[in-house]
C-alpha cells in the first residue's frame, strides 16, 4: 500500500508542476508516473486527449 501511495503522490506533484508550467515533457512524466497509466507509449495519446478535453482548465498549455 505504501508503494502505491508514494507513486500516486509523485504523479500528483508532477501533474501540478506540468499544469503550472505548461510543459509537455512534465505532463508526460506525470502520466508515466501514474500507476494506472502504464508505459510511456500509452501516456502520449492519453496526454493529447486530456489536454484537448481540459483545454479551458490548462491555459499554460495553450498560450494566446
Image (spheres, rainbow, N blue to C red):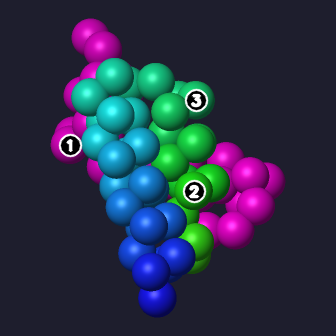
Residue that protrudes farthest toward the front in the picture? 2
Residue at image point 52% right, 76% down: 3
- Give above or below for 40 relative to 59: below
Q: Position of residue 58 (x, y in %)?
A: 27, 37
Residue at image point 57% right, 56% down: 33
Q: Is residue 58 left or right of residue 12?
A: left
Residue under pointer 3: 25
Residue 28: in magenta span: no
- Quadrant where the C terminus is found in the figure: top left
Q: Is residue 41 left or right of residue 58?
A: right
- Give above or below for 59 relative to 35: above
Q: Which residues are magenta?
A: 37-64
Q: Position of residue 30 (x, y in %)?
A: 50, 48
Does the image show residue 31? Answer: yes
Comparing marks 1 and 3, which lies closer to the viewer?
3
Which of the numbered marks, if any, corresponds to residue 57? 1
Amino acid at each position: 500500500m505504501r508503494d502505491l501511495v508514494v507513486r500516486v503522490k509523485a504523479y500528483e506533484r508532477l501533474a501540478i508542476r506540468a499544469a503550472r508550467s505548461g510543459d509537455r515533457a512534465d505532463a508526460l512524466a506525470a502520466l508515466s508516473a501514474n500507476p494506472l497509466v502504464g508505459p510511456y507509449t500509452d501516456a502520449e495519446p492519453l496526454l493529447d486527449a486530456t489536454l484537448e478535453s481540459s483545454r479551458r482548465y490548462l491555459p499554460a498549455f495553450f498560450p494566446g
